[in-house]
Amino acid sequence: MDSTVASTGTEEKTWGGGNRPLKASYGKLMMWFFIVSDALTFSGFLAAYGFSRFKFVNEWPIADEVFTHVPFLHGQELPMIYVAFMTFVLIMSSVTMVLAVDAGHHMNKAKVTLYMFLTVIGGAIFVGSQAWEWATFIQGDYGAVQTKGGNILQFGEYVTVDGVAEFKRVSIDDIAIEQKSDRVDHERKNGLWFVGGESLPPYSVNEIYAGLAANENVLVRNQIIDENGHKTILSRAESLKQIKENGKLVVKGANLHVNEYGPSLFADFFFFITGFHGFHVFSGVVINIIIFFNVILGTYERRGSYEMVEKVGLYWHFVDLVWVFVFTFFYLV
């Protein structure tokens, strides 16, 4: 018995089952599907960060005090300068990718090669810069004391700059007074051979307290932001009292457990979200390198189309766009 198929008249229309829905190739559609799903993932992460930021709105670290370092300029505080440089490099790599796609439309192999190379260089600079920023963030700068309640106490003193008194941070390395102690890192060589312990903090709370008592100009500030947008600075008596009675752990730098800059959630989100984005950039750099060598070998010239360059360009633009949101959430808000 013959079978018949009813025709609806929509087979060749946009979503009627034609070979090029929305006039896009299969590869482009799949790239768009991936971008949409990945955008939802990043949206969830940033939304979670936003809720936590709102919950600790009066205790969250001030970005201008955290991201102040620039390579080869140690000891100078230049808030947001290097982060701005990283952002500029990534955005410019998106520009070179646009130029590579345009050159591909004109079948200009030489220009595609040049602009893909510049895109790879820009992405590599960004990934390297992010790795350096991570290392600096982990290492820390001034150090702090964590209280029994989990709050962070930082140290500083008032200095006069152009006739105006300003509170300047002081490193725990400059005030701590080492005391005789039996503290020993628990390692396999000096303990149970199958057990290793966590590294000890650089100083004990008693050493920090002794240093604070010996430096009369040094004060403690907690992580609570006052009405002027600054951390709350305690009196001399209250500073000594807080370290003596509530000091629990000396913290230097940040990791997934402690954070000298403020609530540990800040460091957790920083590592997770910027790391997830950095993985995307690194993957994009690897993919762009592969496409770059294919361009040199003439693969797309023989195909008669540089559509592959356009598809990886979509991914690269998405990665750049996500960074704009990450930059806004972590460094500007």
Image (cartoon, rainbow, N blue to C red):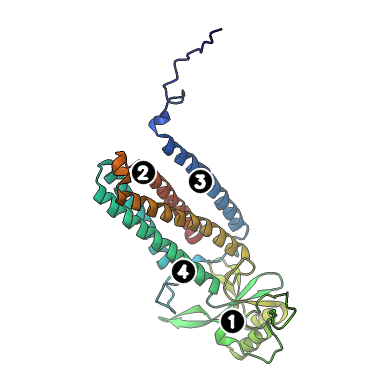
Q: Where is residue 44 in the image (x, y as percent from the top left)?
A: 57, 48
Residue at point 70%, 79% (across, down): 188
Q: In the current view of this chain or complex, which residue is farthest to the top?
A: 1
Question: For residue 61, which quarter of the picture?
Answer: bottom right
Question: For residue 244, which quarter of the picture?
Answer: bottom right
Q: Mark 1 points at which residue?
A: 219
Q: In the current view of this chain or complex, which residue is farthest to the front?
A: 1
Amino acid type of the residue tagged 3 in the rendering:
Ala
Q: Mark 3 points at which residue?
A: 39
Which numbered disc, 2 or 4, marks the residue that appears first in the sequence?
Answer: 4
Which numbered disc, 1 or 2, marks the residue that appears first in the sequence?
Answer: 1
Amino acid type of the residue tagged 2 in the rendering:
Glu
Relative to the observer, which residue lies in front, 251 or 59? 251
Give SS at disc 3: helix
Relative to the observer, which residue lies in front, 118 or 1? 1
Give SS at disc 4: helix
Amino acid type of the residue tagged 4 in the rendering:
Trp
Query: Eyeballing the image, is 165 above or below 39?
Result: below
Q: Mark 4 points at which residue?
A: 132
Residue at point 65%, 70% (across, down): 151
User: Label for residue 310?
Assistant: 2
Mark 1 or mark 3, which is nearer to you? 3
Q: Where is residue 197 in the image (x, y as percent from the top left)?
A: 70, 75
Residue at point 63%, 57% (across, down): 55
Which numbered disc, 3 or 4, marks the residue that appears first in the sequence?
Answer: 3
10 Å crowding of disc 3: few (<14), some (14-19), many (20+): some
Which numbered disc, 1 or 3, marks the residue that appears first in the sequence?
Answer: 3
Q: Where is residue 259 in the image (x, y as percent from the top left)?
A: 60, 69
Q: Where is residue 260 in the image (x, y as percent from the top left)?
A: 59, 72
Q: How far apart are marks 1 and 3 (CA)?
A: 45 Å
Amino acid type of the residue tagged 1 in the rendering:
Leu
